Amino acid sequence: MLTDSTPECVTCRAPIASPYCPQCGERRASDRHLSLFEFAEDALEAFTHFDGRLLRTLKSLALRPGELAVAWVRGSRVPYVSPLQLFLIANLVFFLCAGAIGNHVFDTPLRSQLGSGHARAFKREMLARKLHVATTDSLEFRRRATAFVPTYDTQSFTLSKSLVFVLIPPMALVVGLLEWRRRRFAAQHVVFAFNAFSAFLLLMVAIGAPMTGFLHWRATHGYSVPGNTDNFYSYPLVGAWAIWMALGFRRAYGDHLVMAAAKALVVAFSFLVALSYYRVLLFIATSYST
Ligand SMILES: [Zn+2]
């Protein structure tokens, strides 16, 4: 009920008859107490409110793959943190743990850049030029490359935290092509890709941490341990991620499970391909900035 005595919003001057302004969301001034308690409550709320949304978002991501994309398209944004925020948090969690769980999927040290993978010869020649060595098969090249490792790896790790973003557009494109016939908004594919990537980062921590703990336990009890721990859990990781995506495709796009599983495998495979190009890009960026 709006009457003459209806108070107006202290922020936007619109008349308000409810606890919060319908125009701008400001709280009704008469409900404020201006007490120290309210000040403390206010300060806390910023965190607890966010925590509640974050927990709800993580729960949805973990237990109901694809639900966040559906909610986003439906327009229900208030209960969850945004896809970008979720990705930034997953990214932060992953990179904080990456060192401890020995995961170098994204930061790719110099040794693995030169040892195998896409465009190996190109990378070796580029490094030779940078280190002022004539040929890549000389002893001098090996010596200078080894000396360059700490500088390179530190910079590569720093750059990779933001460079992983370049993996999202191709993933969204693949999802969009796979779901072309459903005529959805492009934004849905982008949200789905952000969520899928966030799930991948968090799965790496969730699977990598106990695996690394187990390997550590084996090592301290005198059992043998594989040299590269990345590979040790890459199969369960990709498997778990593919299951997440299959369930996600089913929920977000209404695919049948078999079709959803096939699409999940296509996305996982194209992700691995994109990853090899990402590594070349990371190598170039790191070389130019060291
Ligand atoms: Zn207002």
Image (cartoon, helix red, strand yellow):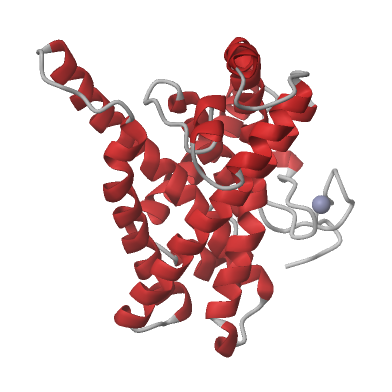
The residue lying at 24 percent from left, 28 percent from top is: 226
Relative to 287, say whether 61 is above or below: below
Relative image position of residue 205 (x, y in whole percent): 38, 35
67 relative position to 175: left or right: left
Relative to 249, say whether 106 is above or below: above
Relative to 90, say whether 275 is above or below: below
Q: Nearer the viewer, residue 108 or 18?
A: 108
Q: Quadrant of the N terminus?
A: bottom right
The residue lying at 57 percent from left, 55 percent from top is: 274
Total label count?
0
Relative image position of residue 202 (x, y in whole percent): 42, 42
The residue lying at 55 percent from left, 46 percent from top is: 86
Q: Quadrant of the C terminus?
A: top right
Farthest right residue?
13
Relative image position of residue 179 (x, y in whole percent): 54, 81
148 relative position to 223: left or right: right
Q: Can I make out residue 31 in this image? A: no
Relative image position of residue 103 (x, y in whole percent): 42, 31
Q: Nearer the viewer, residue 119 or 276?
A: 119
221 relative position to 272: left or right: left
234 relative position to 81: left or right: left
Q: Can I make out residue 155 in this image? A: yes
Q: Nearer the viewer, residue 103 or 244?
A: 103
Looking at the rendering, which quadrant does residue 42 occupy? top right
The residue lying at 79 percent from left, 29 percent from top is: 288
Q: Nearer the viewer, residue 204 or 148?
A: 148
